[in-house]
Image (spheres, rainbow, N blue to C red):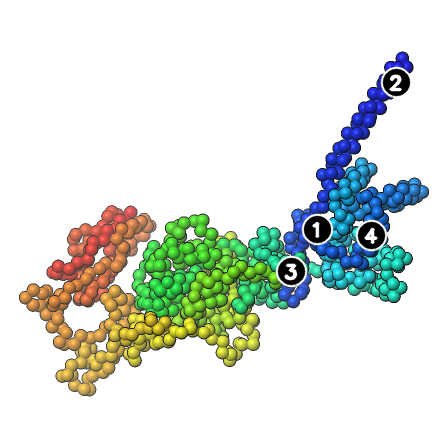
Amino acid sequence: MRNLFVRRQFICFAFAGAVLSSVIVLLAVIAASRARLVSPDSTYFLRDRHGRFLGEAGAPPDGEYGYWELAAPPPRVMTATLAVEDRRFRDHPGVDVLAIVRAMCQNAIHLKRSSGASTIAMQVSRMQNPGSRGYLRKAVEALTALILTARRSREDILRHYLRIVPYGNRVHGIAYAARRYFDKPVDDLSWAETAFLTAIPQAPNHMNPFTGEGKRRAALRGKRILDILYRDKAMSREEYELACFQISDLPVPRPGIRPEQAMHALLRMDQILKDRSARLSPQAGRLVTTTLDLDLQNAMSGLVYETVRKWDASGARNAAAIIVDRESNEIRSWIGSTDYFDENHSGAIDYAAVPRSPGSALKPFFYAFALESREITPSTILDDLQRGPGGIVNADALFMGPVLPRIALANSRNVPAAALLEKIGIEKGYDFLRTLGLHNGIEPASRYGVGMSIGNLPVTLEKLVQAYSVLSREGRLDNLLWFEGQVKPVSRRVLSENTTRQLALFLSDPLGRMPGFSRMGALEFPFPVAIKTGTSSRFRDAWALAFSVRYLVGVWVGDPDFQPMNHLTGSTSAAELVKNILLTLHADQRAGLHDLSFPPPRGFKAARICALTGDLATDACDRVSLEWFRPTEHPVNHCRAHVRIAADMRTGGQASSATPREFITVKTFVDLPPRYAEWAKAAGLSEPPKRPDDLALFAPGPEETPLMPRGKKIQVSIISPENGLSLIRDPETPEEQSTLALRAVVDPVVPQLVWYVDGKPFKVADYPYTVRLTLTSGERTIQARLPDAPFSSKPVRIIVQ
């Protein structure tokens, strides 16, 4: 019986021993897995360019801040920390047995926990793996501390402790606490400031430096720390007395509050730093000076709010604005909405980063590409005569006839822009926009086609401003800069200096904008400003991009839900906001007395150009533009379209030698190529009268008809509609109103031609030959012929559904 009892006792002890061993092994395994130094990423402390607090960025998900690394903890900080937290830090193996015995005795005497025995290594284990306290957890911390001390140097452990220890207000680490509470580097802390901060980790919530009572408690405990340090001879008597005097009244700055007007800018910087899309130099560290100007940010935020609110009734619910220093490409102000906290207008959305249709804001890049590739010169004539490729029309539904690139761009004509994009090539134009960073190239160019010229490629204001920086910085493509010390990629030249200077002259010419835009409006400034506006379909978006000699400014105005505005355009809304911004930025130049003109292209020569022909202007030309040319591209021919002719006042025809002097008057006439005939007539331009002798050219001869010039071959071309055009009739439109314009060009001009439809005569048309065809379902074949003459156009086929 006794042997059975003994055996049972042995089995119980063996089982208990096995369980205990398993627990110890398990605890050891857990401790070993935790015996490493880990920390969240360090927080960025952001200041504006003048050193004022903006906010923190890069904080971990739990919302704690700091965790700044210490390359070498300052001696004062190490001495004060070890004197309070772990006096035998350099002697024990990670667990202080003497401290444990002392704590057990004190706790037993007071019948409560009145003293702790955690070493710095044990505290590191607890802070890295927080949880409820208990004896089992304490055992894991002790094992972890032993293994950690065996694995890592004591300097590493102390440095890590000083990086992660909490100092209240979600602040971690002595270096970050020194910056947050005293706005200075940790190396510059005095003895009083060091003792004050060293006191806080014991009870961070009760020693909050931002409250009067918390600051008093931290100062009292800091005074006791100073007593310990003086007793240990870590400081001299003079240092001790000075520190005791200072600690009772340490100046702690008010807690930094993120400025409401910079919320979107802070969120954008936080995203950039987390994505590492902007690299900072190693010298920059985590104390980051941004390029933002807080005073400017606040002023511009108020200006944007006040300006946009007056358009609220017209459907402009929000706006965004970006201001960039032209010379450095640094962002001075980033306004993502009129009010971040305005829920009624979705103010929390950063509209500077939302892709929207840019309208005509992309046109300058196609003109720049065409100039760069020499597809055009400043004297190239572009036609604004009828619907452009893809059926594109001008916003005002009017046409300006022959126009120079300067006039076409400054007036934002859609038809010439679409034709120009088609000329340089859709793929090439699309690739150039990708080079500028306006899209990622995922979609094929064919998805957008010539519609890119009028804004069917969505872009963000941020990307558009960066693209316009190429124009403002004379062809160099650089990233927009957010931070001082930001690593700059190698600058890429994507356009020549001369091309961008041409564009600046085009976009800053108030006379070039006429007649599309009136003088003295939102597009005109008392100092040179190159400006381009854009308006998306149905007035959903209004844009304005502008640069002066100092700044580049981009503005978007629109509705958060993509609803149409009430006829608010880029020139009537966004441009006004841009003007208000630039007038504020150039307050010292409002009088217009400063010489701040944009420079012409280097080595180019100026010439007076006829705006209708692109040739050198004569005294007869009434529309003249001053353009700059390479020596090899300088025009050599003088305009022959504008002619001054002696006319017979009685007949309106050209005077002859027989016309009495009192009936002769000198008039200026315009003789343009035949394709401009219809436009010229609508514009009220007078054709040169024929001399009496010229009428004989149309006299019938043996082989000529009355309407065919003798000895000349006549070219007949249909310019509208296009061959292969497919139309869908609106069933609600009355049949008599459902018509299609038939237009043709005859060279040389003849008095009449005959339109044929499906091989049958349809209508005789006098010069300039335009008629309208009533649309009926089916396929139609259209041709233009000269009456009783063997000259005709190629047939054009259309389908009406």
Tell me the kind of residue under disc 2: Val
Query: Which is nearer the N-term, disc 1 or disc 2?
Result: 2
Residue bearing the label numbered 3: 283
Please tell me how crowded label 4 is: few (under 14), some (14-19), or many (20+) other residues with Cα within 10 Å. Answer: some
User: Can see residue 343?
Assistant: no
* Gap in angstroms between the C-alphas marked 2 and 4: 52 Å
Q: Are marks 2 and 4 in contact (CB under 8 Å)?
A: no
Relative placement, left or right, of 571 versus 21 is: left
Query: Which numbered circle lies on residue 769?
Result: none
Q: Secondary structure at mark 4?
A: helix
User: Can see residue 679?
Assistant: yes
Nearest the viewer among 54 and 512 is: 54
Is residue 760 placed above or below 50 in the rendered structure? Answer: above
Q: Secondary structure at mark 2?
A: helix
Tell me the kind of residue under disc 3: Gln
In the rendered image, the quadrant that contains the N terminus is top right
* Gap in angstroms between the C-alphas marked 4 and 1: 25 Å
Residue 238: where, in percent of width, then height?
Answer: 87, 66
Tell me the kind of residue under disc 1: Glu
Please tell me how crowded label 3 is: few (under 14), some (14-19), or many (20+) other residues with Cα within 10 Å. Answer: few
Relative placement, left or right, of 161 versus 271 is: right
Residue bearing the label numbered 1: 64
Query: Which numbered circle lies on residue 82?
Result: 4
Q: Quadrant of residue 790?
A: bottom left
Relative placement, left or right, of 608 versus 254 is: left
Query: Which is nearer the N-term, disc 3 or disc 4?
Result: 4
Tell me the kind of residue under disc 4: Leu
Residue bearing the label numbered 2: 6
Query: Which is nearer the N-term, disc 4 or disc 1?
Result: 1
* Gap in angstroms between the C-alphas marked 3 and 1: 24 Å
